[in-house]
């Protein structure tokens, strides 16, 4: 029954790296700390001098790797916006159809069973 719900409904899991989850196929993972992780990854390779760092960052951002990084940053920012738009208050959170939410359950299949039971009442 949970597999049917996740296949027919928009399902998101909102969490961070400190709160791992068991994620079934076809479920969108939103990691709230992904943008920070990407920014840290970029800044680790930059020199301490601000002018040199700005030039180095520009070189990276103009490279194919930098283009991928920009796409990943844009996705991470969209993920944050989407999580905020549904009012996620705690993590992990399993969100179905932007309407049903189960908090604190790292087993996504179990959370989907709870949501399915509620939806079919």
Image (tube, rainbow, N blue to C red):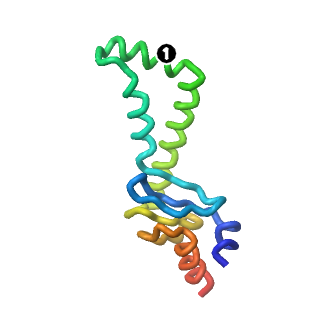
The spot of residue 6 in percent (x, y) is 65, 68
Q: Nearer the viewer, residue 117 or 24?
A: 24
Q: Nearer the viewer, residue 41 or 9?
A: 41
Q: Residue at x 48, y 42 (%)?
A: 77
Q: Residue at x 38, y 27 (%)?
A: 43
The spot of residue 76 in percent (x, y) is 49, 43
Give left or right: position of 90 versus 78.
Answer: left
Q: Quadrant of residue 54?
A: top left
Task: Classify the position of the N terminus by image quarter.
Answer: bottom right
Task: Classify the position of the C terminus by image quarter.
Answer: bottom right
Task: Check disc 1: other Cα within 10 Å, few if <14, some if 14-19, many if 20+.
Answer: few
Q: Nearer the viewer, residue 25 or 115?
A: 25
Give left or right: position of 5 versus 36.
Answer: right
The residue at the far left in this view is 49
Q: Residue at x 53, y 31 (%)?
A: 70
Q: Quadrant of residue 35?
A: top left
Q: Is residue 73 above or below residue 88?
A: above
The residue at the far bottom in this view is 121
Q: Nearer the viewer, residue 85 or 107?
A: 107
Q: Which element type, helix, strand or loop, lies under badge 1?
A: helix
Q: Which residue is mark 1?
A: 59
The spot of residue 64 in percent (x, y) is 60, 23
Q: Is residue 74 above or below residue 3?
A: above
Q: Residue at x 58, y 83 (%)?
A: 117
Q: Is residue 49 above or below residue 95?
A: above
């Amino acid at each position: 029954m949970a597999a049917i719900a996740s296949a027919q409904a928009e399902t998101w899991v909102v969490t961070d790296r400190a709160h791992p989850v068991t994620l079934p196929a076809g479920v969108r993972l939103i990691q709230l700390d992904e943008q920070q992780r990407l920014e840290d990854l970029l800044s680790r390779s930059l020199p301490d001098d601000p002018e040199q760092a700005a030039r180095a960052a520009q070189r990276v951002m103009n490279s194919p790797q930098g283009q991928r990084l920009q796409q990943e940053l844009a996705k991470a920012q969209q993920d944050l916006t989407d999580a905020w738009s549904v009012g996620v208050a705690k993590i992990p959170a399993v969100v179905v159809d932007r309407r049903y939410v189960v908090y604190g359950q790292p087993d996504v299949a179990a959370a989907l069973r709870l949501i399915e039971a509620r939806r079919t009442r």
